[in-house]
Amino acid sequence: MASVTEISDRYVTEIAAHDPARGERWGVASDPTRISDYSPKGYAELADILRRTIAALRDVTPTSESERLGKGFLGDWAAGELGVIEAGERERGISNITGPVSNTRAIFDLMDRSTPQGWEDVGSRLGAVPQTLAGYRATLEAGIAHGRVAARRQAIVVADQCETWGGTQADSGWFGTFVAGYGDGPQRASLDRGARAAAAAYADLGRWLRTEYAPRATEVDGVGDERYQVWARFLLGTRLDIDEAYAWAWDELGRLEAEKALECERILPGAGFDAVRDLLIGDPRRQIHGVDAYREWLQYVTDEAIAGLSGRQFDIPESIRRCEVMIPPEGSAAAAYYTSPSEDLSRPGRTWFPAMGRTSFPTWDDVSTVYHEAVPGHHLQGATIRLVDLTRAQKLGFISAHGEGWALYAERLMDELGWFRTPETRLGFLCAHAFRAARIVVDIGLHTGRKIPKGWPGHESGWNYDLAIQYMIRAGGMAFDKSESEVLRYLSWPSQATAYKLGERTWLAGREAARARAGAAFDLKRWHANALALGPLGLDRLGAELENA
């Protein structure tokens, strides 16, 4: 019988071979000429890998602490993903932030382009884009045949995204811009052909989504309780008590709105949040001007946090003290995001901050986001996990509630440590947390139809798309376009929006339980190190482990 370690190694190898986009994100060697198979056959093969993994884990006995943690993680993770496939969710998977359309384009961001061989692999993968998107379309067509369709709203927004990246007949859109980085050389002509083919495939998919899929799509945005629980098991690692989470989030949102009001009073006494927000967004003196200058400022904030926390709050190894700030292409979703370092750390961790067509950038709310995405947030957690004694799948895996919960906890930790040095940046931190609390009520409300409590906007009318956007604007202080992009994201990815605050709640409860257990001997730095070394776990397992970390 194979050990947990061997099962984990086999899982990673098989998934990377089957799903090269995931392999590229992991930094695991896979065929660099292929892209993932999103056809019905491809998802059936993925389901078979997951079933074999679950069956192999069922009867094996862990022989070490890392195997104990690794068995629990991989069993939960594989079962969660299998549940999503078996429920038919992939047959209606249309999203502006996750899934085949975004994953296929994003794979090129991660590819090595420093050598002739690297560019040759890029050319091969460009040639594979049409087949990949055709397989994805076949899956959506199967969903139509089975009565499983996405919301019309999602089809239209992803059609827009495809057409942005695909460009027009006169140019090759994002793909043409991408291969222009090669310059002149023997592969110039083949790269241009590949870029045109990839761009045409995206443009064709966009037209199909708009003209053929959208008319057959549903006008209903929400998924209902049953489908919501399928996603929660996968993304949170728990069977969610929807009513409890919804009620708790309203209380948390109220608490944070009251705290925001106090901080606003320090900035513009008597003016209120809307006036303060307009000042912070519109005042040129509070902005960074130019995309390059914006990226450089974000890099400075990232580097300052790494230097300031190293050796004090965390022992950060030299090998992971580099985190690069990047600007993703236009057409990407509005939210900043993080990509982990490769398995061998040769590719560094990176944060990606969308420009959204802007050339001037308010900074008041980005400091908290840097701490969330980089250090002590996603980068510290994700890169540290690469270095600790865990099974291979757990080193490379990610459970939203674990990872996003830690990143939100990291923002709060920086507030506890006094890193928000001005009322403006602290208001940005509070808005980030109010925004995540609002995410829970918006996500659950839109998807499951639960009522808005008395005293809150919309109590009389109930949830709708436009009201959800207004909640995001009010809670997070964001512009309309970013708030709308966020709501579109929630509607295409049920329960993921709850992972942040519910995950943070679990991290905080675990810290306080460990503090109570240790008494005067509690050491926060040591607890952080032990807690990070647990690796990703679903909420059910994480809460139990953190008390003893």
Image (tube, grey):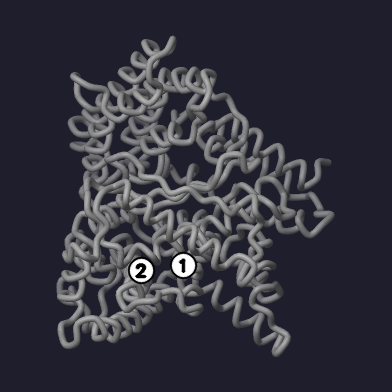
Residues 292 and 488: in front is 292
Residues 161 and 331: in front is 331
In the figure, 541 relative to 138: above or below? below
In the figure, 457 relative to 99: above or below? below
Measure the C-alpha gap from mark 2 to mark 1: 9 Å
Query: For the point 26% across and 61% down, which residue is it?
Result: 362
Residue 531, quarter of the rendered image: bottom right
Residues 484 and 407: in front is 407
Identify the residue position indicated by label 2 in the image. Answer: 432
Identify the residue position indicated by label 1 in the image. Answer: 408
Q: Is residue 488 left or right of residue 319?
A: left
Tell me if I can see residue 41 in this picture: no
Query: For the point 22% across and 69% down, which residue is it?
Result: 280
Residue 243 in picture, x, y percent from top left = 40, 74
Residue 333 in picture, x, y percent from top left = 31, 47
In the figure, 81 relative to 104: above or below? below
Q: Is residue 319 left or right of residue 105?
A: right
Residue 136, quarter of the rendered image: top left
> At label 1, which amino acid type do we have?
Leu
How dense is the environment of label 1, judged by Cα within 10 Å: few (below 14), some, or many (20 and up)?
many
Residue 282 in picture, x, y percent from top left = 16, 64
Q: What element carries label 1?
A: helix
> At label 2, which amino acid type do we have?
Ala
Residue 273 in picture, x, y percent from top left = 20, 77
Q: Is mark 2 on a helix, strand or loop?
A: helix
Do the numbered discs 2 and 1 sit on residues whose CB atoms are within 8 Å? yes
